[in-house]
């Protein structure tokens, strides 16, 4: 199972890599939404993407919108992981096609529980 | 000498406590600081930190390091969360609530008791399930009653305000979007769900305040703290306030609490549910 961690902060990517890695995922990292799309076009298509909102080049919302416009990527689960905590932003992300939303800062348990809610049954609780 | 070292450790425990509070909105009063040693030992081993002093220094230098994250995690696990352990809520959503809504069509009355409600997430999780599952509850008399030993957690439950860290835990984003509004740094539950909830202090081993007749009682992860005899007495008293076809839900790790007398044990999905026996 492949997870893609998309965040412009290297520290945040390594925290998320550790958490989802311990839950049994292989992890690929991207530093912005465009890098993530490029990786996916090169064949690295994850089962789940953990997506920061504010990033250079292409932000998280733009990434979600791009993924949702591509039929062949419709099965990818999209989870925002962001400091954006306004109610309106949460609604916008869900409307754009994100399945879940985690507000930073978070605990490893929060990530694990969300992945369980999303039906990643193999995820250890 | 050792007293001096203890005082130094206490100062650093407090530092760590303040750090965790600032990052999690979970209050760690001094009398809970004993939790630190047990919970932080594995973290300190993993990160090669020799003692609390060094730990406090490291997290104050970099509050967003993996070590700091691990400290927050260790200190906030076991707190209550929305839809905690999910399976009992699946049983409620798919079986118990639809069945009770059907069988209560005449009286249009439903009462549920969260018997160790802590800060209210268990009770409000049920409120969200009810509101989502049933199209029209406006002519129903819904009572969601929460009790706890601690007046401090009851005040927080009544407020129905949760931090970002709390709404991250177990709560589907759709529910967060649908049932909460932003309130400063926190999230406030919708008024029409709060209106169903009542809260009262209750100590299991003291005389109980007046309680209505309940259709479902949740008493999860509490009985394990009592001796067998007291547990059985509490279960008897819960049985007394349950409707004839009412249900009792215990914690998933409480299958060994001994006999749950006067109840039939049912498997509903991946949960064990106890139905009151009529006699």
Image (cartoon, rainbow, N blue to C red):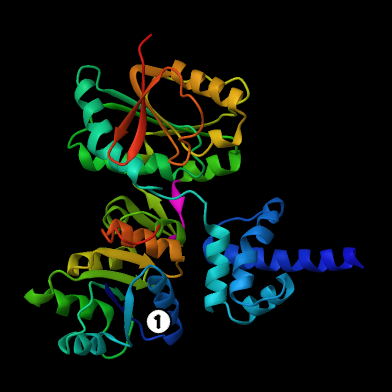
Q: Residue at x 59, y 27 (%)?
A: B228
- Outermost residue, top direction? B279
Q: Is residue B279 above or below residue A9?
A: above
Where does the image place residue B244, in percent across and percent down from the top left? 34, 15
Where does the image place residue B227, in percent across and percent down from the top left? 62, 29
Which corner quadrant of the image does residue A65 belong to? bottom left
Specify whether A123 is left or right of A68.
right
Residue B161 among magenta residues:
yes
Q: Residue at x 34, y 38 (%)?
A: B271
Residue B152 among magenta residues:
no
Please report the bounds of the magenta region as a residue range.
B160-164
In this view of the protein, which residue sits in the foreground, B240 or B224? B224
| Location of the C terminus of chain B (image quadrant) | top left
- Circle 1 — which element? helix
Total marks shown come to 1
Where does the image place residue A75, in percent across and percent down from the top left? 15, 69
In this view of the protein, which residue sits in the foreground, A89 or B226? B226
Q: Residues within 10 Å of mark 1 (few under 14, many from 20)?
A: many
| Location of the N terminus of chain B (image quadrant) | bottom right
Quick check: can you spot residue B191?
no
Which corner quadrant of the image does residue B2 belong to? bottom right
* Residue tagged 1: A13
């Amino acid at each position: 199972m492949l997870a893609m961690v998309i965040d412009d902060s290297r520290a945040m990517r390594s925290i998320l890599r550790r958490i989802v890695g311990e839950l049994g995922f292989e992890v690929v990292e991207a530093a912005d939404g465009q890098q993530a799309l490029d990786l996916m076009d090169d064949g690295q298509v994850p089962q789940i993407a953990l997506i920061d909102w504010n990033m250079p080049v292409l932000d998280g919302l733009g990434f979600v919108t791009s993924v949702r416009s591509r039929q062949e990527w419709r099965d990818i689960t999209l989870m925002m992981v962001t400091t954006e905590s306004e109610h309106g932003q949460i609604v916008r992300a869900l409307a754009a096609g994100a399945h879940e939303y985690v507000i930073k800062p978070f605990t490893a348990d929060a990530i694990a529980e969300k992945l369980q809610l999303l039906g990643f049954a193999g995820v250890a609780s | 000498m050792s007293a001096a070292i203890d005082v130094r450790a206490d100062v650093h425990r407090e530092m760590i406590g303040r750090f965790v509070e600032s990052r999690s909105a979970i209050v760690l009063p001094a009398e809970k600081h004993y939790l630190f040693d047990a919970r932080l030992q594995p973290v300190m081993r993993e990160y090669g930190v020799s003692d609390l002093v060094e730990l406090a220094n490291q997290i104050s230098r970099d509050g967003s390091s993996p070590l700091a994250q691990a400290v927050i995690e260790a200190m906030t696990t076991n707190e209550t969360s929305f839809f905690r352990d999910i399976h009992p809520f699946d049983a409620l959503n798919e079986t118990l609530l639809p069945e009770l809504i059907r069988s209560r069509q005449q009286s249009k009355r439903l009462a549920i008791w969260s018997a160790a409600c802590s800060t209210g997430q268990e009770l409000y999780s049920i409120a969200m399930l009810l509101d989502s599952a049933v199209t029209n509850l406006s002519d129903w008399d819904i009572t969601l009653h929460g009790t706890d030993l601690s007046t401090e957690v009851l005040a927080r439950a009544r407020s129905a305000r949760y931090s970002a860290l709390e709404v991250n835990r177990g709560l589907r984003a759709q529910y967060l979007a649908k049932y909460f509004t932003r309130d400063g740094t926190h999230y406030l539950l919708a008024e029409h769900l709060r209106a169903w909830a009542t809260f009262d202090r209750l100590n299991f081993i003291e005389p109980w305040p007046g309680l209505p007749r309940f259709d479902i009682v949740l008493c999860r992860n509490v009985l394990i703290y009592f001796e067998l005899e007291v547990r059985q007495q509490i279960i008897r008293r819960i049985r007394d306030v349950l409707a004839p076809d009412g249900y009792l839900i215990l914690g998933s790790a409480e299958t060994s609490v001994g006999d749950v007398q006067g109840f039939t044990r049912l498997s509903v999905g991946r949960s064990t549910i106890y139905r009151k026996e009529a006699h």
